[in-house]
Image (cartoon, helix red, strand yellow):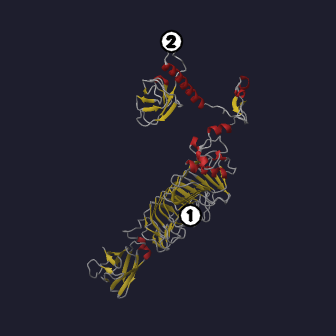
């Protein structure tokens, strides 16, 4: 089949293969199968072995059919490549063939199209450029051992490698050009020699003029870096050099699809140094409605000249700080304010805190409480001792595991800020070492600022250690003011010159369990439990002070008298029962146990058998006896009563 018309068609077509695709059209004419070159991912394929051709001689081309279907994603390139040769001849005085003559002319034009395609894909000087033809010639005399450069008029000129020609900056701009993310952020690099985020997967401030020498102000470079991070969704890398100096807060992007990480290379080099009182929040992750936040990790973050905080998370979801070293901030190293699933893991904090902030703070943001905070084997030491080390306020569901807090004033404070609505509900403190709280302080202070409905509820303190380490007087190991369901067990406390190990103050402490502890240092007669300054359990070998256990420290003899005597039950017993020895001093009837709380248990033992308990169910503070009639107790026998909604119900 002969070609009828040679249209102006490019002799090249390229496809990205679909899965299992075999057929690829070529939209230009050829004479024979050998006129095509077919490439798959740059590899030349063999005709009739790897593929077959149809449509030879058709003005509009035909199809290439691969023998083996492609996986998908391969680049298939089809190029017409007619050999530059003439293999026919018109004999003198021989027969005339218009078909052969047309084929020869068609072949010439097809080859010209191939040359045109090659010419269009070459580097060339525009025809309208003010460059003479003789100026294009690259003579040996002028260009030998030289680089090809172009002057201001676009003329080729010989050049040597120098500060004004092929510089490192020029090479960098070629290797690491301005990225789309940088364009979208309206940021232009100042040092193209620094690889872009597209090349190394992170953003480095040195690309935007930052100098990591711990002395040169890097405010602009850091801010521009964060703008690029927000567009590229790449981490900000502060690992190089001696560290970046910053004298302002830095807003770090948050939100799904926008959150970024800030990373370093460890605690000994690089990082960032915030300096000056203008730095109030440091690396600032500020969201709305629990916006997703990135992570700060493997980073050295230092404060100087009154910088307040190193990192602040506000209204964020899953804010995380891990393997970082914070030092010398005049406020909290890190503050989690109104956060969800916050994490502080394997960090070191030294020399931080103020008269109003602890070394690490967890608190609400406005009316939004923090919830589900996790402390993991971190160490806090030194700094301002006014407030303390780790401060937990207005936060729900807290887990504090491992690590140590020392020389910070009170190491752990839970609910110390004044609040009447939001407390700290459910928490575990496990395996933490508390040291050197300062004279007359405590290791753990609970609920000092809470009142009304803002209570500390459902906390467990276990397997912890408290060591004075230089402190000569530790007032208490644990002090609780407004707490419910507080459990302290298996801890090791030392309270030299102390007042008590466990001090329960106020009227809100209910459901407290003080467990048996494996070892006590410096007991020296210090009470194990006190309630409102009254000893409830003495020092020495201890049983658990808990529900279902008669409390030796609460054994009290009550002498009653009168015709219908009453016994008053101490409400400060926290919901647990006491043993009350009743000695009849002349009374014939005992009608009520006044005071007490619903659920409280009381054991009564009578010194003599001449008192009658009056059965009067449903009456406030009266007895509801098992037999349904009045009872004359036997001398020396324990009788157990549980306070119901109104009356005292006999259970044993």
Question: Where 431 falls versus 477 (above or below)?
Answer: above
- Where is the C terminus found, in terms of image quarters? bottom left
Image height of 634 relative to 91, above or below: below
Q: Nearer the viewer, residue 322 or 589?
A: 322
151 on left or right of 177? right
Q: Which mark is residue 338?
A: none
Which residue does the image show at 48% across and 20% down from the upper left?
99
Q: Quadrant of the N terminus?
A: top left
Residue found 70% across the figure and 26% down from its top: 138
Residue 121 seen in render: no
In the foreground, 172 or 314: 172
Q: How much space separates mark 2 and mark 1, taking CA atoms?
A: 115 Å
Q: Is residue 383 above or below residue 503?
A: above
Mark 2 or mark 1, whichever is nearer to me:
2
First in sequence, mark 2 or 1: give its number.
Answer: 2
Which numbered circle lies on residue 410?
1
* Callout 2 touching callout 1 (CB < 8 Å): no
> Which image quarter: residue 647?
bottom left
For numbered disc 1, what is the local secondary structure?
loop
Q: Is residue 70 above or below residue 192?
A: above
Furthest-top residue in this view: 93
Camera-nearest residue between 591 and 202: 202
| Residue 594 drawn at (x, y percent) | 39, 81
Q: What residue is shown with label 2?
A: 94
Q: How many other residues sit within 10 Å of disc 2, few (<14), some (14-19) or many (≥20)?
A: few
Q: Position of residue 51 (x, y in %)?
A: 43, 27
Residue 584 image offset from top left, x and y in percent:
35, 83
From where the camera sits, is residue 253 visible?
Answer: yes
């Amino acid at each position: 089949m002969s070609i009828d018309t040679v249209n102006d068609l490019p002799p090249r077509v390229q496809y990205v293969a679909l899965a299992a695709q075999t057929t690829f059209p070529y939209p230009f004419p050829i004479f024979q199968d050998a006129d095509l070159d077919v490439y798959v991912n740059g590899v030349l394929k063999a005709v009739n072995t790897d593929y077959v051709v149809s449509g030879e001689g058709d003005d509009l081309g035909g199809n290439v059919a691969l023998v083996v279907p492609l996986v998908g994603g391969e680049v298939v390139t089809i190029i017409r490549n007619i050999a530059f040769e003439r293999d026919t001849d018109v004999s003198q005085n021989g027969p005339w063939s218009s078909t052969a003559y047309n084929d020869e002319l068609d072949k010439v034009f097809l080859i010209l199209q191939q040359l045109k395609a090659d010419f269009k894909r070459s580097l060339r000087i525009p025809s309208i450029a003010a460059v003479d033809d003789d100026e294009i010639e690259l003579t040996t005399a002028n260009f030998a051992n030289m680089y090809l450069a172009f002057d201001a008029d676009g003329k080729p000129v010989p050049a040597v490698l120098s500060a004004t020609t092929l510089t490192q900056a020029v090479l960098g701009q070629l290797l690491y050009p301005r990225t789309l993310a940088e364009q979208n952020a309206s940021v232009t690099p100042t040092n193209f020699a620094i690889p872009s985020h597209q090349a190394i997967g992170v953003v480095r401030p040195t690309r935007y003029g930052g100098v990591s020498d711990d002395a040169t102000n890097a405010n602009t470079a850091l801010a521009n870096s964060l703008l690029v991070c927000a567009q590229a969704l790449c981490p900000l890398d502060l690992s190089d050099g001696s560290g970046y100096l910053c004298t302002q807060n830095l807003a770090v992007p948050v939100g799904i699809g926008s959150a970024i990480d800030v990373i370093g290379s460890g605690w000994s080099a690089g990082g960032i140094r915030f300096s000056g009182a203008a730095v109030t929040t440091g690396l600032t992750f500020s969201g709305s409605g629990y916006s997703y936040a990135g992570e700060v990790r493997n980073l050295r973050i230092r404060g100087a000249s009154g910088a307040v905080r190193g990192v602040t998370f506000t209204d964020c979801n899953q804010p995380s700080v891990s393997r970082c070293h914070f030092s010398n901030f005049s406020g909290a190293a890190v503050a989690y304010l109104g956060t969800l699933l916050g994490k502080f893991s394997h960090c070191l904090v030294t020399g931080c805190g103020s008269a109003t902030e602890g070394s690490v703070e967890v608190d609400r943001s406005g009316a939004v409480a923090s919830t589900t905070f996790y402390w993991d084997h971190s160490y806090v030491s030194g700094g301002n001792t006014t407030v303390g080390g780790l401060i937990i306020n207005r936060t729900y569901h807290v887990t504090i595991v491992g690590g140590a807090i020392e020389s910070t004033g009170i190491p752990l404070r839970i609910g110390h800020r004044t609040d009447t609505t939001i407390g700290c509900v459910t928490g575990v403190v496990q395996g933490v070492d508390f040291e050197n709280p300062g004279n007359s302080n405590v290791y753990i202070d609970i609920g000092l600022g809470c009142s009304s409905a803002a209570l500390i509820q459902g906390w467990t303190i276990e397997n912890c250690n408290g060591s004075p380490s230089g402190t000569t007087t530790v007032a208490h190991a644990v002090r609780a003011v407004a707490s419910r369901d507080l459990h302290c067990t298996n801890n090791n406390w030392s309270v030299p010159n102390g007042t008590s190990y466990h001090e329960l103050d106020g009227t809100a402490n209910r459901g407290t369990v003080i467990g048996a502890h494996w070892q006590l240092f410096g007991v020296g007669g210090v009470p194990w439990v006190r309630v409102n300054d009254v000893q409830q359990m003495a020092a020495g070998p201890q049983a658990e002070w808990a529900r279902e256990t008669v409390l030796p420290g609460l054994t009290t003899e009550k002498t009653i008298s009168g015709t219908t005597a009453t016994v008053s039950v101490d409400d400060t017993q926290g919901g647990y029962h006491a043993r009350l020895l009743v000695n009849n001093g002349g009374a014939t009837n005992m009608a009520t146990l006044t005071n007490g709380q619903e659920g409280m248990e009381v054991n009564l033992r009578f010194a003599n058998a001449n008192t009658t308990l009056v059965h009067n169910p449903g009456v406030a503070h009266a007895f509801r006896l098992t037999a349904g009639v009045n009872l004359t107790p036997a001398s020396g026998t324990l009788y157990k009563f549980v306070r119901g909604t109104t009356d005292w119900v006999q259970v044993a």
